[in-house]
Image (spheres, rainbow, N blue to C red):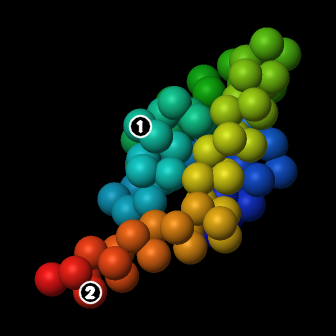
Amino acid sequence: MALLEALALGKPVIAADCPTGPREILGDGRFGVLFQVGAVDELADAMPRVLGDAALQRRMKTCALARAEEYGIDASNARFARCAEALLSR
């Protein structure tokens, strides 16, 4: 949830690539920066790169807001409805 909340607020995201969630939510790194779990050097490199690059921050903000909408109520309801329709049609 924290990743989706940050995206919904248009914040740049740096996340550990743990087994469940971040890679999918961040679109394999298209919507935020992923680093390997435990790779503190990767995290240490990502932080100043994101914080020091205003163009990157703007791009990440734009992408973040669009990505968060994909997990919003309307999009989630539409996915649920498609799933229910597919199950009922069987």
Looking at this view, is 65 or 12 the one in front? Answer: 65
Q: Is residue 58 above or below residue 81?
A: above
* The N terminus, quarter of image: bottom right
Question: Could you say whether the residue bearing mark 1 is in a helix, strand or loop?
Answer: helix
Residue 44 spot, x, y in % from top left: 62, 31
Q: Is residue 26 above or below residue 71?
A: above
Q: In which image quadrant can residue 73 be found? A: bottom right
Q: Which residue, given by chain and number where applicable, does mark 1 sit on?
A: 28
Which residue type does callout 1 highlight? Asp
Q: Which residue, given by chain and number where applicable, does mark 2 sit on?
A: 88
- Crowding at dot 2, Cα within 10 Å, few <14 / some 14-19 / many 20+, comes out as few
Which residue type does callout 2 highlight? Leu
Look at 78% across and 24% down and name the residue there: 57
Look at 44% across and 60% down and name the residue there: 21
Residue 24 visible here:
yes
- Crowding at dot 1, Cα within 10 Å, few <14 / some 14-19 / many 20+, comes out as few
Residue 48 visible here:
no
Q: Are marks 1 and 2 in contact (CB under 8 Å)?
A: no
Q: Nearer the viewer, mark 1 or mark 2?
A: 2
Look at 50% across and 51% down and name the residue there: 25
Residue 32 spot, x, y in % from top left: 59, 36
Asked whether, in this view, residue 19 is left or right of residue 3, the answer is: left
Q: In which image quadrant can residue 77 be found? A: bottom right
